[in-house]
Image (cartoon, grey):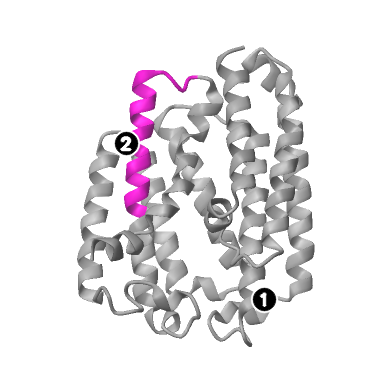
Amino acid sequence: MAKSYIRLIRVHHYIKNILVFAALACSGQMFSRDRLLSCVAAFFAFCCISSVVYIINDIKDVNKDSIHPTKCRRPIASGKISVKNACVMAVILFILAMVFNAFVFRISSTTVLLSYLLLNVAYSFGLKNIPILDITILVSGFIIRILYGAIVTDTKISNWLYLTVIVISFYFALGKRRNELKQSVDGETRKVLQSYSMGFLDKSMVMCLSLANVFYALWSMADDTVKLYNTDRLVLTVPVVLLITLKYSMDIEGDSDGDPVEVLLHDKVLLALCVLYVTVMFVFLYIY
């Protein structure tokens, strides 16, 4: 039963919430005790609130999930966890999210956290059926995570980095829809798929991936970036980022279901490249 609840709250998807640390890490002040503790509390708050979203979505989609080739194994769809117990778990997690958020309480941070919840509830109850808007809401989740972390740590982020995250998030969301469309039959498991074509998704993915690499390169060479970190070596990370995006692109066009977390966790080479990138960035930002 414990394993069913772990699957229900999507613990493995908590890797997305590491984005809460992005602003602090890029500020060069990762080891500032107060800011780091604030970021840790924010991380757990977001983990709890994101699990609430997953539970609500699973409850709403229980009938569709039950006929999906893989989603039918989810705890609620398979009957391992009742809707009533899932609701109780969602309430508990929401309370925990507010408790963790209280440690870093600000009106702006609380507003951002609740906005994420409300936006995704609206997504589950209808907005996911509106083409383009459905992808935009998925993208907003990545941006809100970074914004939340920036607010609780009083950290500013370069506009180039924001743009990089935005377009790469669109790439992830488009890739997810692409593979859902590829695996569906007449879009019976997701209504919005009927509005997309494989050609549109492929061309849009190429556009977003290209922009992501360009924006990241511009950030690494920007005068403000060089002055902030007192180094011009960040441009050396551009080839690593390019390799990461190429390997991810190869995976997404294979047999993957398109979920970014699943792609990352099931590709050891991609994971190794990401670890390499983080290591190189750490050396440049905190050692040199």
- The kind of residue tagged 2 is Ala
Tell me residue 153's x, y (percent).
42, 28
Height in image: 209 above or below 22? below
Height in image: 126 above or below 269? below
- The kind of residue tagged 1 is Lys
Q: Can I make out residue 283 in this image?
A: yes
Tell me residue 138's x, y (percent).
54, 59
Tell me residue 221's x, y (percent).
76, 25
At x 61%, y 73%, the residue is: 180
Image-quadrant location for residue 61: bottom left
Nearer the observer: mark 2 or 1; the answer is 1
**Residue placed most toward the observer, 50 or 227:** 50
- Magenta span includes 215: no
At x 74%, y 42%, the residue is: 243
- Identify the element where label 2 is drawn: helix
Mark on residue 41? 2
**Residue placed most toward the observer, 1 or 16:** 1
Image-quadrant location for residue 4: bottom left
Gap in angstroms between the C-alphas marked 2 and 1: 39 Å
What quarter of the picture does the C terminus occupy?
top right
- Magenta span includes 47: yes
At x 66%, y 12%, the residue is: 230
User: Which circle's residue, 2 or 1, is located before the other in the chain?
Assistant: 2
Tell me residue 117's x, y (percent).
38, 57
Magenta stretch: give its range.
29-49
Q: Is residue 237 left or right of residue 111?
A: right
